[in-house]
Image: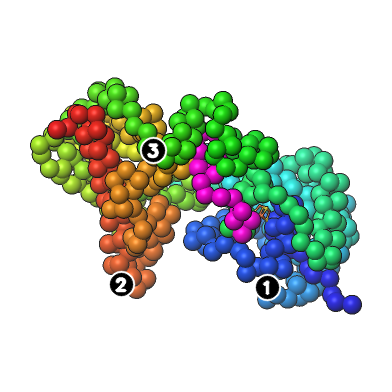
Amino acid sequence: MPAKRVLSKSRIMNGMQCPKYLYLSIFRPELQDAPDSSREQVMEMGNRVGELAREEFPGGVLIEGDYQDLAGYLAKTQAAIIGGAKVLYEAAFQWKQFFFRADILKKAPGGKWDVHEVKSSTKVKEQHLLDLAVQKVICQDSGISIRRTYLMHINNKCRHPDLSNLFQEEDVTKEVDSHLPEVKKEMLALAKLIASNEEPEHEIGPHCTDPYPCAFQGHCWKKIPTPSIWDIPSLKQWTYYEQGKIRIPQIQQLKLPPLASRAVEAHIKGERHLNKEEMRTRLKDWKWPLISLDFETISYAIPEVNGTGPYENIPFQLACSIWPGPKEKPVVADFLDTESADPTAGLTAHLVAHIPQKGSVVAYNMSFEGNVLKRLAERFPRHKKALLSIADRLVDPWPVIKAAVYYPEFGSSFGLKSVAPAILGQKAGYEEMGVGDGNAAQRAYMYLRDPKNPEEERKRLRKGLIAYCRKDADVCLSLVKWMCQQCGMLR
Ligand code: SF4
């Protein structure tokens, strides 16, 4: 009889999200989507958070080994327990074919143990409770008695350089225990599914992205035609999907939100919607000079810049175009600092020196730029007035486009990367750029921060980073020019 297939905790979690996810990852791994390029970065960050969390429980025994040698991990864990260890890091346990390694296990009175699970999020989420329930089921049924279960997460009140309160711990024993019967039942059902070797029937649904994006969406979503109801903005797609309505004509006669209704009409007629009057009304208070502003930021789970907290957006780059008037050419005033530990001081000085004291500051989806500016104003009181004046003058093309324009090419998104190429043509697209999105910009920044990385690649990425941020500012300003032309404000 073949040995039973071992199911790790992450596989069990995949299976609880969708049994087909588990089945495909074991039997049809070749159908997986290409891995997300930010995955490595996220894993690296998770490892650093995990290592730091261990320092809260000093003197423990780390169970190490070859990642494929599960029996080795189990044997080392038992040896450490028998040897009287009070704290274990990465201890391994198995019940039936279910296997997991506990972040931190601490001895409690009465021969029991407490489990401390470490997460990089800033709060407890439902999936964390299920994760801990899986751990508790395996421990209890393999003879390890668990007293309490704790979730250690990042404390968003922590500020660099004082990391003494980086973690916040919550006792979630009661919540985890309430999930135990259902989780144990699900785990046994998953084991049965894998033993049967039969692909489960499972429809697509909100579970394809919640709580985690499934790696098989490319495969399962192939049956959805293009265009479909997923190309319509402002629509509760799953409600219609459950009624068997997938194609746009199937929802044409229904009462829909105005934005969705406009988009349906544009798709059916193959026409572009443009309301020049609405656009003019919304643009009339924008003032010259028009200043296009775009930040690139980095955020750290473990804060690295003085006075900043976990996941705070730290700007290291900006692209700024100052367009004095309709007959003049825009002037560029960009900034990038990949050398300083804290790039924000130089960036703030640059902003204050270069952004004119009058005129509208254009940022696509301006709440991001607004929050960055307000946070800089808190951190640099000397420049508070100037920074808040920039924030107060922010104007946003995004709601203008949303209210006055819809092209079928937008699909369901009004993001700059959907809207700009549709309106301005492929020259406003981001394909074939060395650095082509915000995540790639963050990865490039991290690479450039390390002087040990090869100089040639650093040069290439620096160029790519400069080009990417500039492109955002250029595209945004071109969109504004286009809007002004459409409603006769620029002749
Ligand atoms: S894409 Fe959706 S239906 Fe398909 S395996 Fe993933 S979660 Fe399940």
Q: Residue at the location (68% across, 37% down)?
A: 243
Name the amino acid type tagged 3: Glu
Q: Residues within 10 Å of mark 2 (few under 14, many from 20)?
A: few
Q: Quadrant of residue 206?
A: top right
- The amino acid type found where label 2 is placed reads Glu
> Foreground: 420 or 88?
420
Q: Which residues are magenta?
A: 219-235
Q: Is residue 416 visible?
A: no
The residue that mark 1 highlights is: 67
Per the image, the residue denoted by label 3 is 271
Q: Is residue 72 above or below residue 214?
A: below
Q: Residue at x 74, y 42 (%)?
A: 172
Pointer 2 residue: 455
**Mark 1 is on which residue type?**
Tyr
Task: Give the number of callouts.
Answer: 3
Q: Is residue 469 above or below residue 79?
A: above
Between disc 3 and disc 2, the foreground one is: 3
Q: Is residue 367 magenta?
A: no
Closest to the observer, 230 or 205: 230
Image position, residue 202 (x, y; %): 73, 52
- Counting residues from the start of the chain, the first of labels 2 and 1 encountered is 1
- Label 2 sits on a secondary structure element that is helix
Quadrant of the rendered structure where residue 307 is?
top left
- Looking at the image, the residue that sits furthest to the front is 269
Residue 141 located left or right of residue 232: right
Residue 176, horizontal then vertical, whole percent: 78, 44
